[in-house]
Amino acid sequence: MRLRPRQMRGAPPFPRTFRQVSVARIAVFNQKGGVGKTTTALNLAAAIAARGRVPVAIDLDPQGHLSAIAGVLPSSPEASVYAFYRDARPLSSLAAASSLGWPVIPAHIELAKVDTQFGKGPNVLNRLRIGLARDGLGEAGCVLIDCCPMLGVLSLSAIFAAERVLVPVSADYLAVKGAMQVDRTLNALSRVVGRRIERRYVITRFDGRRRMSWDILETFKARFGADLAESRISENVSIAESPFRERDVFAHAPASRGAADYAALFEELEATGFLGEAPGPAQREPLAA
């Protein structure tokens, strides 16, 4: 597998803009569904793994789409992250070896009960943060948390546990309105945690043939400035097909535009420090086929 980001000749390298952390915990979140949230978590984890690091993915969406793609969707809630919330099971004991080649802590439909069963007090909202620190997950890579598309206990728990938030936003008008709501939400939560929640917005389902996509791009640049990733994910059939095949886009169609776009996003996020400590020089050979 070879990850080939599209790069402009002579383009300057991305500056390192994020504070240094040894293990990055990243919540992939948007309050709107259908924006490529799970797809982005899937392919970013695959790119991290291809570089020789070991990502750990946590599926916090009761729909369990990431778990299903990874082939680890459990029949019982006892084998899912629900057991962490209900029974205080260690997260490390719930990590399943996936068909994708990196561990996934799977979801279960019972996760939908967390809001009503455990309330919204600080104990439950900080449980994931404490659990991740206690288990030391992601020390060989990073932790990616695929959030559910609503702002409830699960998503709040993920945001409080994460150093930073990645917000996929599709190139359509309603998604723009949703992203502005996410920004207001993150700003409000920043006051709660006592620091600005670091974030990156990434445009997905971009179609360069449509004037609306370019208009939305300009709107995002004006609204989010440096918080907007320069890389964007094009509308691409390979990206849509790969989850159906239970594969990431690099394994499914390595020469596709979709694979190139997600490789470019990975390179940008790694260079800016969004993904935590990058591998040392000995590990930084070109992403291998």
Image (tube, grey):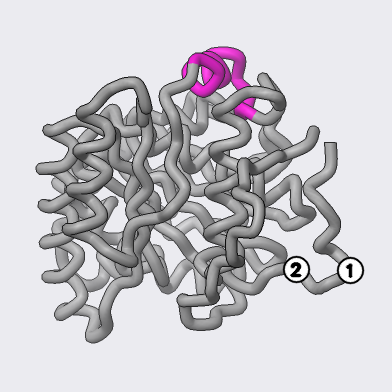
Residue 180 is a magenta residue: no
- Which label number is shown at residue 282? 1
Q: Main secondary structure of the magenta part?
A: helix
Q: Estimate the x, y position of residue 161 in percent, counting from the top left.
A: 38, 67
Mark 2: which amino acid? Pro
Q: Given contact means CB atoms under 8 Å apart, are the residues at marks 1 and 2 in contact?
A: yes
Residue 245 is a magenta residue: yes
Mark 1: which amino acid? Ala
Q: Estimate the x, y position of residue 129 in percent, counting from the top left.
A: 40, 70
Residue 45 in view here: no
Q: Which residues are magenta?
A: 237-249
- Which label number is shown at residue 279? 2
Q: Residue at x 37, y 47 (%)?
A: 202
Q: Estimate the x, y position of residue 184 in percent, counting from the top left.
A: 11, 62
Q: Secondary structure at mark 2?
A: loop
Q: Look at the image and tell me in which quarter the C terminus lies.
A: top right
Q: Estimate the x, y position of residue 141 in percent, counting from the top left.
A: 66, 61
Report which quarter residue 123 is drawn in. bottom left
Report which quarter residue 199 is drawn in. bottom left
Where 7 sits versus 27, above or below? Answer: above
- Which label number is shown at residue 189? none
| Lateral position of residue 178 relative to residue 83, left or right | left
Q: Residue at x 13, y 52 (%)?
A: 180
